[in-house]
């Protein structure tokens, strides 16, 4: 099938912005797409997300966090991703398994092999065919996310992850880059510290090269 494309990167790196722009671009070319996200790509996942992101939940242990993300993924893969892939759509997914490897292994320090085992079970061994990694200094991403949250005029919107220390975010960033190094064929690293347009151009180029290679 080879139509499963994931968007990854630290907080505020521009994933959601670029998923939307690429979705519009592909739709304009009459390429069937489905845009989705984790953990909130299903109604059940949104409820799980409310628990995960609630900044009052400071006591949440990393193991709970891991299983909640995986529970949301199990639901999302079966309810949304597989059906769309079976209909022949390209699925553009805002965060997927690599986020769990980067955040819960590199960020929280849980065992990567164990996470891979659990994740394989939840994701039914579904792996992205192409992964775009939006890479930038974590401070820049957090500033962008902070501005976005302020614009939403709800001071409580900054989530539990955005409130983590810089060290945590830097470990996540390095975790993503290590994943890239082990699977360079699947990843494309995009310099996300530039303008939205420049990033969108790179995103399109990588995705169109990927699509054209298959046809
Ligand atoms: N290249 C860019 N330059 C400046 N601002 C940007 C850029 N890309 C996105 N933004 C803005 O930064 C904020 C964060 O972008 P976005 O929500 O797309 O990031 P994200 O990676 O999805 O964040 P999160 O990890 O919180 O889901 C938004 O307000 C968005 O409009
Ligand atoms: Mg987002």
Image: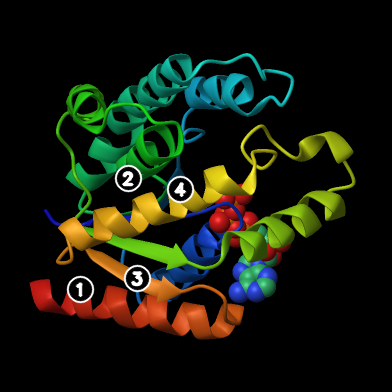
Q: CA distance from mark 2 to mark 3?
A: 13 Å
Q: What residue is shown at x 20% (from left), y 73% (from top)?
A: 210
Q: Which residue is mark 3?
A: 189
Q: Nearer the viewer, mark 2 or mark 1?
A: 2
Q: What residue is shown at x 49% (from left), y 25% (from top)?
A: 45
Q: Which residue is mark 2?
A: 98
The residue carrying pointer 3 sits among few (fewer than 14), some (14 to 19) or many (20 or more) residues within 10 Å by Cα, namely some
Q: Is residue 12 above or below residue 115?
A: below
Q: Nearer the viewer, mark 3 or mark 1?
A: 3
Q: Earlier in the sequence, mark 2 or mark 4?
A: 2
Where in the figure is residue 129, as x and y percent of width and height? 19, 56
Q: Nearer the viewer, mark 3 or mark 4?
A: 4
**Would residue 23 be found to the left or right of residue 163 on screen?**
left
Q: Nearer the viewer, residue 27 or 157?
A: 157
Q: Which residue is mark 1?
A: 210
Query: Are the residues flagged by discs 2 and 1 in contact, CB closer than 8 Å?
Result: no
Q: Earlier in the sequence, mark 2 or mark 3?
A: 2
Q: What residue is shown at x 45% (from left), y 65% (from top)?
A: 134
Q: What residue is shown at x 39% (from left), y 31% (from top)?
A: 109
Q: Earlier in the sequence, mark 1 or mark 4?
A: 4
Q: CA distance from mark 1 to mark 4?
A: 29 Å
Where in the figure is residue 5, as x and y percent of width and height? 29, 57
Q: Earlier in the sequence, mark 3 or mark 1?
A: 3
Q: Which residue is mark 4?
A: 171
């Amino acid at each position: 099938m080879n139509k499963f494309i994931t968007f990854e990167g630290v907080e505020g790196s521009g994933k959601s912005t670029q998923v939307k722009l690429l979705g519009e671009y592909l739709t304009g070319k009459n390429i069937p797409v489905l845009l989705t996200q984790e953990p909130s790509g299903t109604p059940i996942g949104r409820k799980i997300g409310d628990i995960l992101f609630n900044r009052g939940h400071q006591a949440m242990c990393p193991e709970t966090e891991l299983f909640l993300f995986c529970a949301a993924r199990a639901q999302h893969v079966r309810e949304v991703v597989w059906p769309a892939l079976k209909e022949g759509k390209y699925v553009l997914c805002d965060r997927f398994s690599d986020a769990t490897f980067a955040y819960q292994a590199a960020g929280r320090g849980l065992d990567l092999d164990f996470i891979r085992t659990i994740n394989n079970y939840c994701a039914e061994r579904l792996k992205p065919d192409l992964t775009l990694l939006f890479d930038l200094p974590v401070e820049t991403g957090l500033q962008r996310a902070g501005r976005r949250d302020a614009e939403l005029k709800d001071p409580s919107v900054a989530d539990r992850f955005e409130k983590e220390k810089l060290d945590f975010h830097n470990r996540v960033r390095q975790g993503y880059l290590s994943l890239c190094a082990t699977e360079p064929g699947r990843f494309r690293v995009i310099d996300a510290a530039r303008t939205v347009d420049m990033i969108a151009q790179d995103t399109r180029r990588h995705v169109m090269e990927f699509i054209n290679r298959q046809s």
